Image (cartoon, rainbow, N blue to C red):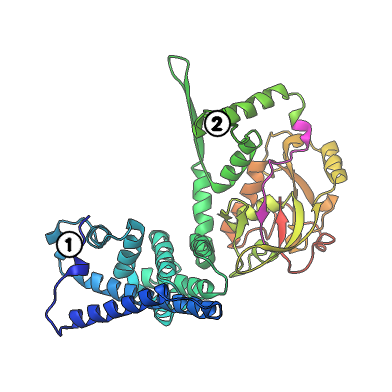
Amino acid sequence: MENTSSRAAFAPGSRPARMLGMLDTAAALAQEGAEADLPAAAADELGAEITALAGRIDRLHLAMAAQAARFAASGALARAGRRNLADWIATTTGRPMAEATTLARIAEHGPDYPLAVAAAHRGDLSIAAVGAIIAAVENAVPHYPADQFDGPAEFRTACEEHLVPAAMAAGVTLRDIRRLGAEILSRVAPRTREEQYRDRYATRGARFAQSLDAGFHLEAWGDEGSALTWRSAVEMFQCPPGPDDDRTAQQRYFDAMMSMAEHALAHADTAPSGGGARPHINLGVSLERLRDTDGAEPARTDHDTDVPGSLAQALASDCVLRRVVIDPVTGDPIDLGRARRLFPKRIRDALLEHHTTCQWHEGCGVPARWCQLDHRIPWWRGGRTDLANAQLLCGRHNRLKYMREAAHHGTAGTDPPGGADPPGGTDPPDHTGPAPPMAA
């Protein structure tokens, strides 16, 4: 592999020659420390030395990225026959492509992220953390809402102001930063996140095509809520492969789908009587997010997927609640409360006595026994969990209700679609206060 930069010759006394001489001296001193005897009492001091060296190396990387930006702007990449800066760094310095990509990303976008770069110069952020922040925001820039921000620069600033302080918090890992970055659009532009969700739901579809040789092709596409339901349902029929299982991952997934279909056929006469219960989905959502409070933590599934507010509200309308206190930095649970069904069975039984189909105000023929219970006035807005405030909605209309309200009011779950609101009330027992519940 080509690697010419480390052995390049420079005029004696020039800035590059002096710089490289200092680095050679520093490397020799570090090697001397690595080879010296280590008294037991000096181990902590050595650890501090390693940490300090890492910080200085990150500052060198920042300087190298700035130099790389000037190098690329000069047109030298084309003369060197390289397709991009990351490729040039990897091939000429011998750096792994992941590291080269981080340096190239900082070279290209560093001036757009002054808070992150300044934190790295101070030693508060690693070079990898800066690269992760830039990558996350740049992935979101093509989707930024032009009606909420005065150009991409203002959007980048808003994102950086969210991510940099969170990334500098004690105990935050690179994985945590990437997770926060993946949610950045939900944090700074929740309305846009809602619109994207509605668009994906509106363009949902599936295609089943059977070929002349009796084979078939199944294709489906849609929104994240449908993905949650589908994946959870298929996972019920999956198990880890045994030692003699030579199926591919795709074949195991196919077989799980077929097991699910066969189970439905085998229990076609009894399956709908299961009370309309959903496949098991774990959703972590705070009361602040359910109430659409600005800046609230996004709702997140146990697959680490954030979901828009209206979908969280739809999933929480008929669920099992568990109070969970979450560490705001790591996302780990600190305290768990007991699980409790939001609607007692007697309310479902009473509604099934009087309704045979979904109670959607525009009409729906889905059998009532397949439907989910829904609060006409959501419980997180004071609606009571009683018969007067309950209705049966199929899964499609339960979600459509909250999507329509989010689009109409800018705040999901404020008023039921059509009809008079029943009297308000209090939150369900044992589920009041600020602690985030889990909707399953």
Answer whether residue 76 is visible to the viewer in this image: yes
Q: Dot 1 lies on which element? A: helix
Q: How many marks?
A: 2
* Residue lying furthest bottom: 13
Query: Is 256 displayed left or right of 54 in the figure?
Result: right
Q: Residues within 10 Å of mark 1 (few under 14, many from 20)?
A: some
Magenta residue span: 272-286
Mark 2 or mark 1, earlier in chain? 1
* Residue 368 rendering spot, x and y as whole percentages: 75, 36
Rendering coords of residue 213 (x, y %): 44, 14
Which residue is tagged 2?
252
- Residue 199 in percent (x, y) is at 49, 49
What amino acid is labelled 1 in the image? Leu
Q: Nearer the viewer, residue 78 or 275?
A: 78
- Answer with the quarter of the image where residue 253 lies: top right
Is 419 placed above or below 330 here? above
Amino acid type, callout 2: Arg
